Amino acid sequence: MFESLSDRLSGIFDKLTRRGALSEADVSEAMREVRRALLEADVALDVVKSFTDKVRTRAVGQEVVKSITPGQMVVKIVHDTLVETLGSDARPIDLVAPAPVPILMVGLQGSGKTTTTAKIARRLKERERKRVLMASLDTRRPAAMEQLKVLGEQNDVDTLPIVAGQSAVEIAKRALTAARLGGYDVVILDTAGRVTVDEGLMDEAAEVKRVTDPHEVLLVADALTGQDAVNTARAFDGRIGITGIVLTRVDGDGRGGAALSMRAVTGKPIKLMGVGEKADALEDFHPSRVADRILGMGDIVALVEKAAENFDAERAAKMAAKMGKGEFDLDDLAEQLKQMQKLGGMGGIMSLMPGMGKMKNQIAAAGLDDRFVKRQIAIISSMTKKERAKPAVIDAKRRKRIAAGSGTDVADVNKVLKTHRQMADMMKAMGKQKGGLMGALGGM
Ligand code: GDP
């Protein structure tokens, strides 16, 4: 998740690390790029502006300690500002109130509200040993009530028996009474959702809130909807008043824009994030960890897995293990070249690796341009199995043969071998480092 933002940011800081001092012009230029990266990640405009202003103020005039580079300094400031924008500390669901503690779930239809209700119930039951009762207030969609009931059965959490014909407020009252009489610790009320924010929806949710006086009002919002999610949050907070946000589908969120904007726009903490369809795919929202991810500090396995969207899992795992051990032969290079073609060129694979901006130039300089990719694959296919596995055996005579076999010349063969050597070295270095952007910067 959050890959594209991390790609963009790592490239920007890569440029900065090559500068001698941290001048106002440097910072301004970097901030222009950061601004563009954030906007492309669908972060709200006013959030982008205040973010870059904050970083600029902190960075310019900042004394750069001898042992670190200007780039590292800015990365640190950006990281700290990201953490701050995301809300600094993790804020779990607050259950400090007389039992049964009412929690109201609000949000648009399809945001993952019902799934999240069950996920939270399951988590409170398993981690905090709470007795939880769930109730669906969606009177217009019997299927939604049935869905919650099924989720309750699957996760061994009680649901309020369905009584046809009751209004949302009546069901809410009945749920509170049942929770009190039944000795439950927590009662989670899943309100009805609509496809878009509408007055009827807001009125009903507001009325349920007034009647039940919930300790938490959690807005469930779909991270994939980016700015729309932010607008939804603003609307719900303005009309009903929320205490926190659960961001869903973070597992599919390649941009991270919603996560960054939500807290800044509403001032309300993101408490949890949904990272999959399964009942246990719910994680605490830790601002510092999310900031780390946005800055691209992923490990090698994670990156290879990402690049592997187009290849099968087994091959990806093998490649990851090899890279980790620093083994990388010509077959692997051919494999990478083919993947590159599939992923839309050189940018594809390299851009998945945090802090790889420098490597990109190196590889371009080595002639690993897309135009040459095909020819290089042809050259590798003209080698014997042994040559591919052990490039060291390829002497002058063999080079001539390979060149003739692939319809190229010896200089081209040499280029392939050089590229392989460089990539093998790089893989080895990355295998040792595993530090992503920070690791790469540390080595400069
Ligand atoms: P509701 O209409 O808001 O109650 O939405 P549902 O709870 O019915 O969820 C709609 C769909 O989103 C379902 O297929 C869920 O499995 C799926 N979903 C919910 N949360 C997540 C999540 O965090 N990640 C992914 N990938 N899918 C989710």
Image: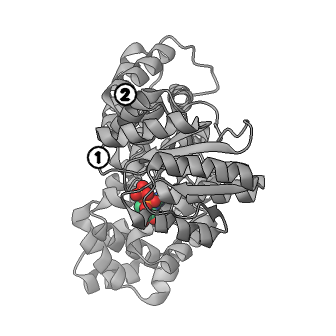
The secondary structure type at the circle numbered 2 is helix
Query: Which image quarter: residue 95?
Result: top right
Residue reaching furthest to the top: 61
- The quarter of the rendering in which ligand 1 is drawn is bottom left
Say which of marks 1 and 2 sits in front.
1
In the displayed structure image, the side of residue 326 where residue 26 appears, left or right: left
Where residue 141 appears, as percent x and y from the top left, is 37, 61
Residue 52, compared with residue 425, is above or below; it is above
Number of labelled discs?
Answer: 2
Q: Is residue 136 visible?
A: yes
Q: Residue at x 61, y 41 (%)?
A: 286
> Mark 1: few, some, or many residues within 10 Å (few <14, many ≥20)?
few
> Mark 2: few, some, or many residues within 10 Å (few <14, many ≥20)?
many
Query: Which image quarter: residue 229?
Result: top left
Q: Residue at x 36, y 57 (%)?
A: 140
Residue 98, compared with residue 26, is above or below; it is below
Q: Nearer the viewer, residue 182 or 418?
A: 182
Model colouring: one colour
Q: Residue at x 25, y 63 (%)?
A: 370
Where residue 426 appears, as percent x and y from the top left, is 52, 57
Going by the numbered disc 1, the residue's amino acid type is Thr
Residue 429, compared with residue 294, is above or below; it is below
Where does label 1 land, which residue? Answer: 196
Q: Is residue 442 visible?
A: no
Query: Which image quarter: residue 38?
Result: top left
In the displayed structure image, the side of residue 48 where residue 152 appears, left or right: right
In the displayed structure image, the side of residue 199 where residue 313 appears, left or right: right
Where does label 2 land, which residue? Answer: 48
Q: Earlier in the sequence, mark 1 or mark 2?
A: 2
The secondary structure type at the circle numbered 1 is loop
